[in-house]
């Protein structure tokens, strides 16, 4: 039987550990670990100590950028795969001001009173179990997007964050980008006129995933920890590194991968939250392979007087609006097209700006560290991220149900 979330947390934490860690953390803060101004030179004793859980791809990118922050001590990296862990440590150690320790068991990170914050960059299905454990341990959290693996996890995560007073920054790095914010302000000031439609998309070619037989778990890999609260099943290399996202138990396909970012921009620009109706059509049209999630999908999110459209095609190289991924806002005075490289207005007044994905990441991590110090709400707070992740789950749910969903469907799911 799979572990419930409560059993998962009980395995990780008892009351005595929690109280002891909380006392140690309070003493550390009182001693001045997190009192340094972000603009001052950082003494070793005043750097924010951070650990990164999951360091194969995204986690390693974030760890690299954190190591470059003068007021951050990248203290520990953690992964269930020893080959990934040692590779990451070898790459990151020369960048850090102090030696980096490695852990295969994230519980030791949560037990360490000297660590103030954790980055969770593991597969989607383990985001909430790890975040709940981190909240119980009193750690601030940078939680990769989408912040939830299932819609039903929303309330539990909100309650845990509120009761622990832990700060959660979602990995929606576009929210911290100055150029991206300029584009949103352009929209909100009415410079595009009345905007009733936004479209978000991803169009590119992915390779099919050939079917593979179940196999022995690789040496040293803690597959039980990787599964988190999910049903035990034999190890299969197709469901492990990176490709887990194409299987419903662990991810939500391209819609969850990119939609949590691009749909967040779409609804931010339109100033909307939960839709009234969601309808989806698509399927596995091009790939007859091991994957479960659709290679072709269209989703319509209906609001009172606005619409958001989602589209992905994983077998095509012809982009939409000239960009392989992005968001377009259609107003009666022009069209604004936005992606991680910047934005531009067409058929309207000349306007735009240029940025890079790296600039967005640095600004977002900087906001996270500053929020730890000031206890101010981060730019991508939990309520914001839950709606954007929720749109992805609703789109997938409508697709799998084969019918239109209404507000009752997701209100029931959220409890």
Image (tube, rainbow, N blue to C red):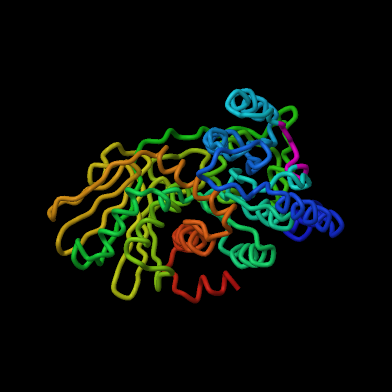
Q: Residue at x 82, y 58 (%)?
A: 19
Residue at screen point 66% across, 63% down = 165
218 in relation to 47, above or below: above
Q: Is residue 399 visible?
A: no
Q: Is residue 104 above or below residue 248?
A: above
Residue 12 appears anywhere in the view: yes
Q: Position of residue 58 (x, y in %)?
A: 53, 38
Taking 165 as reference, is 27 left or right? right
In the rendered structure, does residue 174 fall within the stretch colored magenta? no
Name the foreground residue: 25 vs 341: 25
Q: Position of residue 75 (x, y in %)?
A: 68, 36
Of all residues, the one furthest to the right in this rendering is: 16
User: Residue placed at 41% from the left, 45% from the top?
Assistant: 295
Q: Does the magenta stretch include residue 102?
A: yes
Left or right? Give the position of 299 relative to 415: left
Counting from the top left corner in percent of width and height, residue 252 is at 51, 51
Residue displayed at 36% across by 38% down: 356
Image position of 400 with respect to 341: above or below: below
Q: Give the range drawn in magenta.
A: 101-108
Q: Residue 143 versus residue 303: which sits nearer the camera?
A: 143
Q: Which image quarter holds the C terminus?
A: bottom right
x then y, percent, for residue 39 = 50, 44
For the image shown, how many numbered marks are present on the structure?
A: 0
Name, please, the residue furthest toward the front: 40
Depth check, front residue: 326 or 186? 186
The quadrant the N terminus occupies is: bottom right
């Amino acid at each position: 039987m799979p572990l419930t979330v409560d059993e998962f947390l009980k395995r990780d934490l008892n009351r005595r550990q929690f109280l002891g860690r909380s006392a140690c953390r309070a003493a550390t803060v009182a001693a001045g670990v997190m009192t340094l101004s972000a603009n001052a030179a950082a003494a070793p004793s005043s750097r924010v100590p951070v650990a990164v859980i999951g360091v194969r791809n995204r986690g390693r990118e974030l760890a690299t950028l954190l190591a470059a922050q003068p007021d951050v001590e990248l203290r520990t990296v953690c992964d269930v795969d020893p080959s990934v862990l040692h590779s990451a440590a070898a790459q990151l150690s020369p960048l850090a001001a102090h030696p980096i320790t490695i852990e295969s068991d994230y519980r030791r990170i949560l037990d360490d009173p000297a660590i103030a914050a954790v980055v969770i960059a593991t597969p989607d299905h383990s985001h909430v179990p790890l975040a709940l454990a981190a909240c119980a341990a009193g750690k601030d959290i940078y939680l990769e997007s989408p912040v939830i693996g299932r819609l039903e996890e929303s309330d539990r995560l909100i309650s845990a964050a509120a009761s622990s007073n832990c700060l959660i920054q979602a990995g929606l790095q576009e929210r911290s980008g100055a150029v991206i914010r300029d584009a949103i302000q352009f929209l909100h000031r009415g410079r595009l006129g009345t905007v009733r439609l936004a479209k978000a998309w991803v169009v590119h070619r992915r390779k099919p995933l050939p079917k593979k037989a179940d196999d022995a778990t690789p040496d040293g890999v803690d597959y039980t920890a990787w599964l988190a609260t999910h049903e035990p099943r034999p190890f299969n290399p197709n469901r492990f590194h990176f490709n887990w996202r194409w299987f419903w138990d662990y991810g939500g396909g391209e819609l969850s991968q990119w939609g949590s970012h691009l749909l967040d921009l779409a609804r931010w620009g339109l100033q909307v939250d939960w839709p009234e109706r969601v309808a989806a059509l698509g399927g596995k049209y091009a790939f007859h392979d091991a994957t479960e999630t659709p290679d072709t999908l269209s989703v319509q999110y209906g609001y009172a007087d606005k619409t958001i459209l989602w589209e992905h095609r994983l077998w095509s190289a012809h982009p939409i609006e000239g960009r392989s991924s992005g968001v377009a806002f259609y107003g009666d005075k022009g069209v604004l097209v936005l992606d991680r490289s910047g934005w531009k207005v067409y058929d309207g007044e000349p306007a735009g700006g240029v940025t890079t994905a790296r600039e967005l990441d640095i600004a977002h991590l900087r906001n996270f560290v500053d929020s730890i110090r000031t206890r101010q709400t981060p730019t991508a707070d939990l309520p914001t991220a839950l709606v954007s992740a929720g749109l992805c789950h609703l789109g997938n749910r409508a697709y799998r149900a084969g019918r239109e969903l209404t507000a009752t469907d997701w209100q029931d799911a959220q409890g």
